[in-house]
Amino acid sequence: MAEDTLFSKIIRREIPADIVYEDELSLAFKDINPQAPVHLLIIPKQAIATVNDVNEDNAHLVGHLYVVASKLASQYGFAKDGYRLVMNCNEDGGQTVYHLHLHLLAGKAMGWPPYTDKKKV
């Protein structure tokens, strides 16, 4: 069984969140520490800890998160201008909550690369 996370508690309404979308498979809410004018988190209701835990049985949920992102981009009016979708994996990837989630960032032009470091891998 997956670890009980902050996102599990949001799904169960044990802690508040500014929810902007919900269906039978997913939930989307505003990030409490936004990194862009629009910063939403889209999560599956089924607990999947990391991208490494995606498999044939739950892969459809990841695709569904992207469908929801597209719907929200249209609903919020930034689909044409553009937006960024990010899914972090584990500590070095920037993941802090171990419940799979898709960051939807919009409302400003995004630069690339998002982070530069002189150290090469």
Image (tube, rainbow, N blue to C red):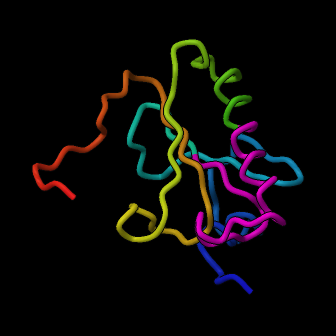
Please identify the residue farthest to the top as the structure is shown: 80
Horizontal side of residue 105 vs 46, given as left or right: left
Q: Start and end of the magenta stretch?
A: 41-68
Horizontal side of residue 119 vs 3, given as left or right: left
The question of residue 44 being in magenta is answered with yes
Query: In the picture, residue 57 is in which quadrant?
Result: bottom right
Please identify the residue farthest to the front as the structure is shown: 121
Please identify the residue farthest to the left as the structure is shown: 118
Q: Position of residue 19 (x, y in %)?
A: 68, 47
Horizontal side of residue 42 vs 106, given as left or right: right
Q: Which residue is drawn at 50% across and 40% down?
A: 39
Question: Which sits in the foreground, 66 or 10?
Answer: 66
Query: In the picture, residue 13 is in which quadrant?
Result: bottom right
Query: In the picture, residue 34 is in which quadrant?
Result: top left
Q: Position of residue 100 (x, y in %)?
A: 62, 62
Q: Which residue is drawn at 69% across and 29% down?
A: 70
Horizontal side of residue 110 vs 79, given as left or right: left
**In which quadrant of the rendered image does the C terminus lie?**
bottom left
Position above or below: 115 against 57: above
Q: Where is residue 53 in the image (x, y as percent from the top left)?
A: 65, 71
